[in-house]
Image (cartoon, grey):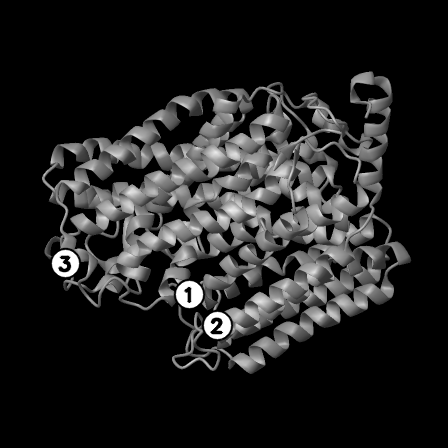
Amino acid sequence: MSRQANGTTNESQPATGAFEVADLKLKKQISLFGLIALAVSVQVGSGWLLATLAAASHAGPASIITWVLGALFFGVIGITWMELGAMLPRSGAGVRYPRLTHGAFLSWFNGWGYLIAALSLPVIEVQAVITYIGGHWPELGLLEVRQGVTVLSWPTGIIAGVLLLFVFFILNSFGAKLLSESNKYVTIWKLIVPLTTAILLFSAFNSANFTIGGGFFPFGGGAVFSALAGGGIVFAYSGLRQILDFGGEVVKPQRNIPLAIVIGGLIIPLVIYLALQIGFIGALNWDLAGIKPGDWAALLNSDWASAPLLNAVAAAGFGWFSVVLLTDAVLSPSATGWVWLGIGTRSVYSMSVNKELPVVFQRMNRFGTPIVALIACTALGVVFFFPAPSWYLFVGMVSIALTLSYVMGGPVLAVLRRTAPDLPRPVRIKGGVAWALAGFVASLMLIYFAGWVPLINLFTVLFLALPIYGAYTSVKEGWSRIAPSWILSGLLLVAWVVVATGGGWLATLDQKQRPDGWPFPVYFGAFVLAIAAFLAILYAISTPTGRRHLRAGVWLVVTLTAIVGLAYFGQFGPLKNPPLGGQSDVIMMAALSIGAFFWAVRSGGPTEELDDILQAQRELDASDPTTAS
């Protein structure tokens, strides 16, 4: 990695295009320490309280390896984002970059996927708070058991969650400075309490737990990979790329963003989670958890599931520390949820800047907060309490949604190397295209390892982006006429409801297909046919410009659809004897990812928005002699 900016190390704010004029109202208030604190706060939230048990239930003692694998995967992915974040620091960066390289269709599809994650994250953190409190004080009636799964109760638990989400709204309305400054002190607490917890757990260390129930790999080597998403590990590393979403409000972003990615996004979380995972497994008391020794899978439904670390610390003889853990069970996830609601707000703001949502979402209050976007994110967040009112059910789907937002980093970097070679790069990655390919493959692999149920749930919701694009963006830009576009989008929406309902996989509490669900060939065939027909007809009725935008983004739709089919028949799918067993599915997935990368890079090219930024950069360079080569 090298630092350069056309031969200089100029740290001035890079040029802003005319279409980004709203960015001038954002206030640059976040320091390096504040940015690192935001990254740590995003990652050390509900994940540290619940992911240790979730990971152990998926992989047993081998979950320790999964945490290291997660750091390696995200380290490879993060290299690409360091160059992008330093080169184009933008608030809501992840949903803005694809617009510069692939145009409106891919930008909307990518933004919609990330928006799902950003809207879900505050809710899943609230669920963690309510789960811990409700598990410790069952008399409050915050939890109930449905189909053998502990979920937030209706109305008590869900209403309590909605009220906490509203608190996040109030705090976010006061702007990035309050968020950043307050979060510094919360982050210090977040570092002290988990590390203290790990130390206490080591005092009750039982080495036999690392070989009981089938040895160190009780579920085989494949479980080490499946635990990445289902065990909450991908979710726990979720703050790496989210650092970029505050890029437009960061002081000296060219320096601070890359440093925050390395320190706050990777090193600190890895140390904390490794210590906690090893400590939890060593301190696990099977009798007190109410399950047979060595029955790792039963942990999810055990007496410890609602508050694993609290129970483990109490079993180790430190009951007095439960007060601290209960306090942190409220504070840590709440701080993370507060930050994530801010990230979601900036994502909606950025989609508005991209002209994918109405301009009203760019409206700021006097604290520099996109207030209309914040109101919308809070209101939509309430909806996510209902389909999966449980942290353990929700975490896999949210993890994939987060990872999907990392996928675009590789193609965007490779295309910008070709279309904007002279754009100042304070951080330039040596062998950038190779790293871009590696990060792209790693992202899609993480998605695949999540397993069939989280995949099909997310992708079902994700493909709702298509009728919205056809009815809104395509019409608004004048690329297709209103009547045929609305009819086409309406038909796809009806088909979506029929197929999603008929498939019998969507939002099932037991993570299994409903008994009356369609056979997979029927379900997948209808799924593919509806999507293909929509894209073909929209392409036919679009102008040449509209067709160009569709061609630039169709690779992602095809790639995700192919992953769904592969996942069903692979080792992480629902079949007891999958035809793609062993590692053949992983090899096919790697080949699919490599092919998709080169298709994605070939599909990208110059866009009007990128030309706007490049022209502004040329004007900035011409007025500042220090930027001359």
Question: Which secondary structure, mark 3?
Answer: loop
Q: Which mark is residue 508?
A: 1
Amino acid at dot 2: Gly
Whether 141 is drawn above or below 263: the answer is below
Residue 163 visible to an observer of this rendering: no
Asked if residue 63 lies left or right of residue 43, the reply is left
> Which image quadrant for residue 242?
top right
Residue wearing tag 2 = 504
Residue 317 coordinates in the image, percent (x, y)? 9, 39
Structural distance between the alpha carbons of marks 3 and 2:
32 Å
Callout 1 secondary element: loop
Q: What residue type is labelled 3?
A: Gly
The quadrant in which the N terminus is found is top right
Tell me the kind of residue under disc 1. Thr
Vertical side of 222 occupied by 32: above or below: above
x and y percentages locating residue 278 in the rendered image: 25, 48
Mark 2: give few (<14), some (14-19) or many (20+) Cα within 10 Å.
Answer: some
Give me the residue at 57% from left, 66% from top: 590
Residue depth check, mark 3 versus mark 2: number of the one nearer the observer: 3
Q: Name the residue under label 3.
A: 290
Q: Is residue 237 above or below residue 627?
A: below
Q: Using the image as rendered, state which of residue 22 and residue 628 is in the foreground.
A: 628
